[in-house]
DNA sequence: TGTACATCAGTGAACGCGCGTTCACTGATGTAC
DNA sequence: TGTACATCAGTGAACGCGCGTTCACTGATGTAC
């Protein structure tokens, strides 16, 4: 009951990795049970020993996305403590690195927002929301340290994530040597948002936009 | 040579509308030539009198998206001239209205970013870029009128579009009565970005984020 | 340790289905005289 | 206006293909004695 189980888990892993790899091309929605099974080295019928159908596999992929995002945050926080340069820079560089390393995982997140099923979309949305909330907490903490209260932290977090994911999505389709530009651009954009999120200190600058 | 041609164009329109309608469910990538033909009321073989394949139809859908976006901008500018309330509010309300009215068109834009083919993605990206540039011009104009120079207009435009499209995408999956909240949220987020994009007037507020 | 039996991950063949594409065709519309 | 011919949007049957799913099966691993 150990070697056997281990073997099974190994095949399961292979299926997950195969799905991740194959969905790089045209998204998870575009791949078939047969393709995934073949890539993982088993027959289509064998697939059913592991998942009820492709949707179940898809939901597990989304879990992996969530896991990846949390790892990303942990890594980013760690880098911020070393604080050479700004916190934003450290975070963005970690983020772009993550995207580069986990392109296929990020593609799932990016691509299946209007994916194959309602359950799918809901799960993905929940995962992203969780990420936004964690970013909000980070912002809150940072703003207290710097003594720069923010006007509306959750909103700022949402805007930051929206912009980061959009630019991140672009990064996937770009040759590596142009990643650096994207990184700089993203840093500037996020700083812009943060600047707008800081509550005015003395004379509030008038704006009528 | 007139009635004939007219009839043909009519069928073509039906195919386009059918594709738009069917792709509402699970995106354009998920629909078949046979489905579209059936929905449009012709046999699958007849499809080829109008398009070489589904990809060609898809590219035309993207053109329609572009057309829609330009109409949206025109409408938003018109509303701004009436300027009851802020320019941002007028724009956002027009935007959300557009999304509500053209949900399927917007879904194409939203959903096929990592769509079926490279040509597809490129076309979509080009269309969005064009939109970003027009927003940038609007921002530039607005900032001159208000005498509030912006630090980096193209960047601000990009961030604005990223946030607007993200929130817009959420709007699609939400019951109508909650649209209002989303509208307000989007307005706040865009104002936040604009605040961050305005060049500091006198003493630049220090920030180390 | 050796034997008899149970478990169960993975096999391979078969199924019915919807797909994209081809083809010769039909019949209404358009054109030339 | 009437006739003979050309055009061509749309038909309907046929094709081969990959799909998801089922099923009885095999044979290696695990368990009980």
Image (cartoon, coloured by chain):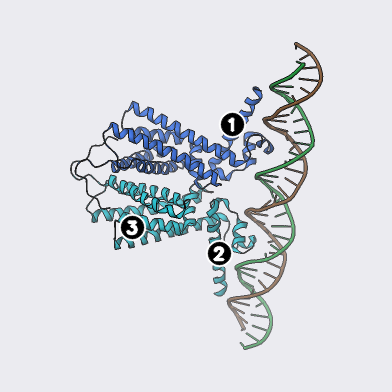
Chain colours: A blue, B cyan, C brown, D green
Query: Badges 3 and 2: C-beta atoms under 8 Å apart?
Result: no
Query: Mark 2 = which residue?
Result: B14
Q: Residue, x 57% and y 73% (percent of image)?
A: B4
Residue toward you, C21 or A109: A109
Residue toward you, B194 or C8: C8
Question: Which quadrant of the rendered structure holds the N terminus of chain A?
Answer: top right
Mark 1: secondary structure: helix
- Sequence-wise first label, 3 or 2: 2
Q: Quadrant of residue A59?
A: top right
Asked whether, in this view, residue B111 is left or right of residue A139, the answer is: right
Q: CA distance from mark 3 to mark 1?
A: 51 Å
Q: Position of residue C15 (x, y in %)?
A: 76, 47
Q: How many marks?
A: 3
In the rendered image, residues at marks 3 and 2 fall on the same chain: yes
Q: CA distance from mark 2 to mark 1?
A: 45 Å
Mark 3: secondary structure: helix
Examine the rendered structure and indicate whether residue A151 appears above or below residue B110: above
Q: Work out whether residue B185 can be spotted.
A: yes
Examine the rendered structure and indicate whether residue B12 appears above or below residue B89: below
Q: Position of residue A35 (x, y in %)?
A: 63, 40
Chain under callout 3: B
Q: Residues within 10 Å of mark 2 (few under 14, many from 20)?
A: some
Asked whether, in this view, residue A205 is left or right of residue A115, the answer is: left
Number of the label disc, if any, that sits on residue A13: 1
Query: Badges 3 and 1: C-beta atoms under 8 Å apart?
Result: no
Asked whether, in this view, residue B92 is left or right of residue C8, the answer is: left
Number of the label disc, if any, that sits on residue B90: 3
Mark 2: secondary structure: helix
Q: Quadrant of residue B86?
A: bottom left
Q: Residues within 10 Å of mark 1 (few under 14, many from 20)?
A: some
Q: Nearer the viewer, mark 3 or mark 1?
A: 3
């Amino acid at each position: 009951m150990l070697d056997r189980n281990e073997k099974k888990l190994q095949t399961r892993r292979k299926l997950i990795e195969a799905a991740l790899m194959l969905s790089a091309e045209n998204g998870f929605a575009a791949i078939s049970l047969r393709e995934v099974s073949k890539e993982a080295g088993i027959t289509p019928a064998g697939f059913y020993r592991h998942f009820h159908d492709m949707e179940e596999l898809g939901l597990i992929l989304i879990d992996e996305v969530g896991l990846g995002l949390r790892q990303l945050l942990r890594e980013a926080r760690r880098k911020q403590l070393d604080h050479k340069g700004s916190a934003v820079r450290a975070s963005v560089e970690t983020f772009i690195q993550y995207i580069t390393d986990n392109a296929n995982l990020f593609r799932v997140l990016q691509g299946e927002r209007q994916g194959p099923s309602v359950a799918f979309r809901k799960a993905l949305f929940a995962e992203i929301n969780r990420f936004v909330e964690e970013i909000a907490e980070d912002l809150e903490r940072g703003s207290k340290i710097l003594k720069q209260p923010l006007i509306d932290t959750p909103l700022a977090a949402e805007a930051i994530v929206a912009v980061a994911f959009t630019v991140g999505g672009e990064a996937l389709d770009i040759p590596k040597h142009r990643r650096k530009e994207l990184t700089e651009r993203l840093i500037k954009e996020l700083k812009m948002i943060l600047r707008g999120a800081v509550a005015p200190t003395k004379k509030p600058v008038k704006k009528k936009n």
